[in-house]
């Protein structure tokens, strides 16, 4: 089975801090994604990557950056954390979707981040 | 831009009964994929069922089936013989031709004993 591991389930940080959320997958997936999940808003895509060192902005990239130096690891960075970034963060991975491929995403357990 | 709408924030069903969760989407793409994910209180999102838009036949996975109406852009999930373990948030998702997945806002399903 695919395993997507997020480094922390709970994290508390202070405003202005630089925050790193780490995600590792063990199935050699090309595609990796970061979402934030808020009540009533569902999942919103922050960034995604379809290859090492490649990244694409999602729907809400402001205040975030990402790093993908190795295929298995995709990091989300909050450059200067703010209280409105308090949320649940979900990482996901998937195989490439070239052609007619119904490959789904596989998710980690999520990191509940609180910014005080 | 594509959108996914789940109009039922919360649903309840008696154990052993059948429930249908609604999902509609908007797109100009002709080829795409649709998914239903389940997120139990333990938080990990789990794939429930998937549907290819080019297939007319509705997908089925054990007690879970979909009613896919491409012209109406509707993709509802039917859960038969509901069990306590089915209680969770359910998200409908659309995958675009550009790798992106777009999720609805979710429906919380409660299963009553």
Image: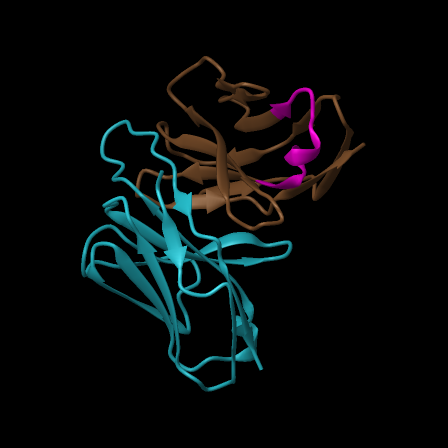
Magenta residues span: B78-90
Query: Does residue B90 appear left or right of residue A26 in this picture?
Result: right
Residue B65, x across and y down, in percent:
56, 20
Q: Residue B76's image quarter?
A: top right
State the residue at coordinates (52%, 28%): B73
Drawn side of residue B92 relative to residue A61, left or right: right
Q: Name the residue located 51 percent from the left edge and 52 percent from the top edge.
A: A43
Is any atom of residue A91 visible in this view? yes
Where is residue B28? Give x, y as percent: 41, 34
Count of labels shown? 0
Percent across and percent down for residue B8 are 70, 39
Q: Is residue B83 magenta?
A: yes
Question: What residue is drawn where x is 45% and y is 45%?
Answer: B102
Question: What shade does chain B have?
Answer: brown
Whether B64 is drawn above or below B9: the answer is: above
**Residue B1 appears in the figure:** no
Residue A77 position, x and y percent, is: 36, 72
Display coloring: by chain
A40 or A23: nearer the viewer: A23
**Which chain does the cyan colour mark?**
A
Position of the C terminus of chain B, as image quadrant, is top right
Q: Is residue A106 above or below residue A70?
A: above
Residue sitting nearer the eye, B103 or B69: B103
Extreme residue toward the top, this view: B57
Q: Is residue B32 left or right of residue B44?
A: left
Residue at image position (36%, 65%) is A22
Q: Quadrant of residue A39?
A: bottom right
Q: Residue A7: name its quadrant.
A: bottom left
Q: Is residue B19 magenta?
A: no
């Amino acid at each position: 089975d695919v395993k997507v591991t997020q480094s922390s389930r709970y994290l508390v940080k202070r405003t202005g801090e630089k925050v790193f959320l780490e995600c590792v997958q063990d199935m050699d997936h090309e595609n990796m994604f970061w979402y934030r999940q808020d009540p009533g808003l569902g999942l919103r895509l922050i960034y995604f990557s379809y290859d090492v060192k490649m990244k694409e902005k999602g729907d809400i990239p402001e205040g975030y950056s990402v790093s993908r130096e190795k295929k298995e690891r995709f990091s989300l960075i909050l450059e200067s954390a703010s209280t409105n970034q308090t949320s649940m963060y979900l990482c996901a991975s998937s195989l490439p979707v070239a052609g007619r491929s119904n490959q789904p995403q596989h998710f980690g357990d999520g990191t509940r981040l609180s910014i005080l | 831009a594509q959108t996914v709408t789940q109009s039922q924030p919360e649903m309840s069903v008696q154990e052993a009964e059948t429930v249908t969760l609604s999902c509609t989407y908007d797109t100009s793409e002709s080829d795409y994929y649709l998914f239903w994910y389940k997120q139990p209180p333990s938080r990990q999102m789990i794939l429930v069922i998937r549907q290819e838009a080019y297939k007319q036949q509705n997908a089925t996975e054990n007690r879970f089936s979909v009613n896919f109406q491409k012209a109406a852009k509707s993709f509802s999930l039917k859960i038969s013989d509901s069990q306590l373990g089915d209680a969770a948030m359910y998200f409908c998702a659309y995958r675009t031709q550009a790798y992106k997945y777009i999720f609805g806002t979710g429906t919380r399903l409660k299963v009553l004993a």
